[in-house]
Amino acid sequence: MASRTIENYLKQLWLQQQESRGKYVPMGKLAALVGVTAGTATTMVKAIADSGLAKYAPRAGVRLTRAGEQLALHVLRRHRLLELFLVEILGIDWSDAHGEAEELEHVISETVLARIDLLLGHPSVDPHGDPIPSSAGTVEAPVLCSLAELQAGSRTAIVRIVDQSSEFLRFAQTSGLVPKAAVVIEHNNPQAGAISARPDGKPPVILSMAAAAKFLVRPCPTAGKQRRKRS
Amino acid sequence: MASRTIENYLKQLWLQQQESRGKYVPMGKLAALVGVTAGTATTMVKAIADSGLAKYAPRAGVRLTRAGEQLALHVLRRHRLLELFLVEILGIDWSDAHGEAEELEHVISETVLARIDLLLGHPSVDPHGDPIPSSAGTVEAPVLCSLAELQAGSRTAIVRIVDQSSEFLRFAQTSGLVPKAAVVIEHNNPQAGAISARPDGKPPVILSMAAAAKFLVRPCPTAGKQRRKRS
DNA sequence: TAGAATATTTTGACTATTCAAAGTAATGAA
DNA sequence: TTCATTACTTTGAATAGTCAAAATATTCTA
C-alpha cells in the first residue's frame, strides 16, 4: 500500500497533469504543490518511479503511469466524497472542508467510504463542482469554459470552482457565485481586464479576468457539450 | 502536538492504568498493548517522560502525569465519539467500529469532532458502554460489577462490555448481551466455574467466569451506586 | 556564444520510529 | 544462597521522509 506521503504526491501529480494536458510535470511545480523542497521531490519521485507508479525523466519532469493514475484517482475519490460528506452531513463550512478532507483521505477505509457514498446517494460532484471519480477509477471530465470567456448578456450557471483556497471560497460564497447558481454577464470588455457578473437575486460582482477564470460554467456557447472520458 | 505514535502510547497507558488502579505499568505490558517490542517501548517511554507526559521508573514501569492523562483523555474522547458516530450515523458494524476509530482518532480535527458530538446529541457513552470523556478531559467512572458476581435469580441490565475484539463483540451481539439489554441470571454456582444468563426475549447463554467478567452491569446489589470522579 | 539566471539533482545530515540481539537486573525455585 | 528464568534496557542498524547547501544542467539575454 502507498504511504500517506506517496498518496499525496500522486494526487497532486494527477491534478497538475489535468492542468498541463498530460505533459511531464516539472519537479519545482510538484515540490511546491506537495509543500517540500525540490530536492525532496526529486528523491521521492525516483522512489515512486521505481515502484512503477510514475515515469521520471531527469530534468524534464514526472508523469503518472496507468497504475499511478488509478491510485491517484482512488485518493481523489476519497477526498471528494469526504468533502461532500463534511459539508452535507456534518455541516462543516464549505471553505474548511478541503483542508479537513486532506487529512482524512489517507485513513478512511473502503468500508466507511462505501457507507458515506451510500448515505450521499452516490453523488457525482463534490461541493466545488469537481467530479468524483468512480470506485473503478474513472472520471467524467466535461469540457467547460470559464466566466471570463462569456460575452456580455449571456446567461449561464456555475458548475465548478477551480480555486480551493478557503479565502477564495469564502469570497465566492458571499458573492453568490456557488455551483448551480445562475449568472448573467453584465459587462465583459477584454480591454478592461475585468468583468461584471450578476448571480440570480444578488448584486453584480466585479471580477478580474484571473478571478473570472476560476469559475467554470455551462452552457458554454463556444465549446458545445462534448465530453471526454479519462481512465 | 503529540504524534500519532505518542497518542497511542498515552491512550494505552491510560487504559491500562484503569485496570491496575493507578500502579506503574510495566514495559512488557505496554509494549504488548501498543504492538511493539519491549525495547521500542522503553525508548519511546523515555522520550515521552522527557516531554513531561509520563513518569518513568527504570525496571518498574511508567505512569502518566496529569498532563499525560489530559492528552490521553482527549484521544479517548475522539476514539469513543468516533465509534459511536460510525455505528449510529454511518451504520458500520459494532464489531468493526473500534478498528476504524483507531485510525481516525489521530486525524480528526476539533471542528469536525464538535460537529459529530452535536449530531449525536452530546452522548455520554460509546457503543460498548464505555464513558466518553468530556472535552474538558474528565470521565465519569461509575463503579460497576460484572455478570460473574451476580447470584442466580438476579435481574440486571448490561451497561458496558470490556472486551473490544470483534470476535467477542460479534458473540455478544448474537447472544443478545448488548449494552442496555435486561438480563436474568439463571445459574451461578462458583464451583461450576460458569454461569447461565438469559437476556430478555432470548435463549439463555452459558458463559465461563472469564467471559461473564467482561460484561459490566447495573444495578449491582453488592456495590451500591457510588460514583468516582476522575481527572 | 559567453555569462547570468534559473531549475534540477546530488550529497550529507537529521528526526522519528522501529527491530533484533546482546547485556543487565530482578525474581523465584531448589 | 545460587542458578535459571523472566523482564527490562542498551546497542547498533534499518526505513521513511525531510532539509540545506553544493554541484550540475538548461535556458535566456545581451
Image: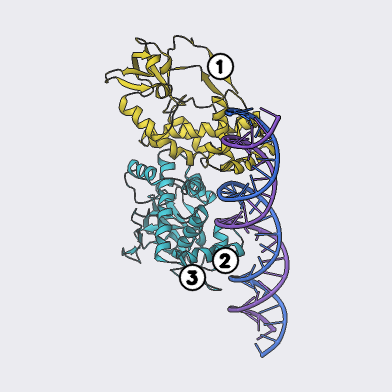
Chain colours: A yellow, B cyan, C purple, D blue
Disc 3 crowd rating (10 Å Cα; few below 14, some 14-19, many 20+) is some
Q: Which numbered circle lies on residue B36?
A: none
Distance from disc 1 to disc 3, alpha carbons, whole Å, reads 63 Å
Three-letter residue code for mark 2: Thr
Three-letter residue code for mark 1: Arg
Distance from disc 2 to disc 1, alpha carbons, whole Å, reads 57 Å
Residue B47, position as x, y percentages in the image: 52, 64
Residue drawn at (51%, 59%) of the image? B9
**Of A222 and A139, which appears nearest the observer?**
A222
* Camera-nearest label, 2 or 1: 1
The answer to whether tags 1 and 3 share a subunit is: no
Disc 1 crowd rating (10 Å Cα; few below 14, some 14-19, many 20+) is few
**Which residue position holds label 1?**
A228
Tell me, yes or no, whether the two marked residues, 1 and 3, touch with CB atoms within 8 Å: no
**Which residue position holds label 2?**
B42
**Which residue position holds label 3?**
B24
Give the letter of the chain under mark 1: A
From this view, report whether residue B215 is shown above or below residue C26. Answer: above
Give the letter of the chain under mark 3: B
- SS under mark 3: loop
In this picture, residue A44 sits left or right of residue B53: right
Instruction: Confirm whether residue A115 shows in the render.
Output: yes
Tell me, yes or no, whether the two marked residues, 2 and 1, touch with CB atoms within 8 Å: no
**Of B16 and A17, which appears nearest the observer?**
A17
The answer to whether tags 2 and 3 share a subunit is: yes
In this picture, residue C22 sits left or right of residue A228: right
Residue A230, position as x, y percentages in the image: 58, 21
Residue drawn at (46%, 71%) of the image? B23
Give the letter of the chain under mark 2: B
Of mark 2 and mark 3, the one earlier in the sequence is 3
User: Split into 4 quadrants, where in the image is the N terminus of chain B?
Assistant: bottom left
